[in-house]
C-alpha cells in the first residue's frame, strides 16, 4: 500500500500509463489488419458486402495510434500534490517539458467535501468547496487509485473535509 506522502504527491507520465500503450497497440492492429485485408472480400454469409468498412477501420486505427504516439513522445503528465510551501492542493493535466499544461489549486480549508461517485461504469471524483460548488478542473485523473485511499489521506491532513461515497 502507498504511503500517505505518496498519495498526496502523485504524478503519472504518459510513458508509464498502460492505457496509452494499449491504445497504441490496438490502433496499430486496426491499421495493419486493414492493410492486409481485401475490402472486396469483406462480405457476410448472406452476400451483404461493406467494402468501405475496411479502410474506415484502418483510418480509425491509424488515428488512434497517432494520438497515442504523440502523447507518448511528448510524455504528457498529470498529477496533484500538497504544496509544502503554501499548503495548497495543486493539480495539473497536459504538462510537458515545453508547456505547463492546465490545472489549479485550492486551499484545503476551502474544501468541504470529497465526493466519490461509484454509480456509473467508472468512478468519478469531485471536490466540493465550502460554498457547495464543485471545484472546476479537478477530477479523478489527477489522483492515484484507489480514489478512497487518496480521499482519506487528504481528510486526515484536513480533518474538516467529509468523504462521501455515492452508489
Image (cartoon, rainbow, N blue to C red):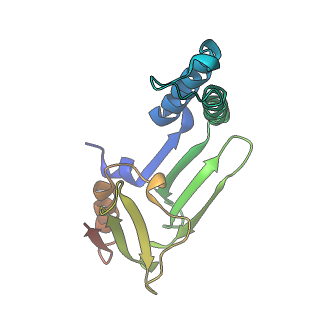
Q: Residue at x 67, y 34 (%)?
A: 70
> Foreground residue, 80 or 138?
138
Q: Position of residue 157 (x, y in %)?
A: 33, 66
Q: Residue at x 27, y 69 (%)?
A: 166
Looking at the figure, which quarter contains the N terminus?
top left
Rendered position, 111 above or below 61: below
Left/right placement of residue 71 relative to residue 158 reads right
Which residue of the protein is positioned furthest toward the top in this rendering? 36
> Foreground residue, 51 or 19?
51
Picture quadrant of residue 55: top right
Q: Number of callouts in the render?
A: 0
Rendered position, 54 above or below 94: above
* Residue 157 visible to an observer of this rendering: no
Which residue of the protein is positioned furthest toward the bottom in this rendering? 131
Which residue of the protein is positioned furthest toward the front in this rendering? 46
* Residue 95 visible to an observer of this rendering: yes
Picture quadrant of residue 137: bottom right
Q: Residue at x 47, y 36 (%)?
A: 19
Rendered position, 140 above or below 166: above
Picture quadrant of residue 121: bottom left
Q: Position of residue 148 (x, y in %)?
A: 28, 58
Q: Position of residue 139 (x, y in %)?
A: 47, 61
> Foreground residue, 10 or 116?
116
Rendered position, 28 above or below 107: above
Looking at the figure, which quarter contains the C terminus?
bottom left
Q: Position of residue 47 (x, y in %)?
A: 52, 24
Amino acid at each position: 500500500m502507498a504511503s500517505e506522502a505518496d498519495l498526496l504527491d502523485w504524478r503519472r507520465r504518459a510513458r508509464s500509463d498502460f492505457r496509452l500503450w494499449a491504445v497504441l497497440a490496438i490502433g496499430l492492429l486496426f491499421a495493419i489488419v486493414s492493410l492486409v485485408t481485401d475490402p472486396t472480400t469483406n462480405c457476410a454469409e448472406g452476400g451483404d458486402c461493406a467494402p468501405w468498412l475496411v479502410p474506415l477501420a484502418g483510418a480509425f486505427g491509424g488515428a488512434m495510434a497517432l494520438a497515442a504516439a504523440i502523447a507518448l513522445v511528448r510524455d504528457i503528465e498529470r498529477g496533484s500534490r500538497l504544496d509544502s510551501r503554501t499548503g495548497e492542493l495543486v493539480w495539473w493535466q497536459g504538462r510537458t517539458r515545453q508547456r505547463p499544461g492546465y490545472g489549479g489549486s485550492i486551499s484545503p480549508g476551502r474544501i468541504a467535501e470529497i465526493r466519490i461517485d461509484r454509480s456509473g461504469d467508472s468512478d468519478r471524483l469531485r471536490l466540493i468547496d465550502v460554498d457547495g460548488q464543485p471545484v472546476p478542473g479537478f477530477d479523478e485523473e489527477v489522483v492515484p487509485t484507489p480514489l478512497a485511499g487518496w480521499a482519506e489521506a487528504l481528510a486526515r491532513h484536513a480533518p474538516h473535509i467529509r468523504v462521501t461515497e455515492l452508489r
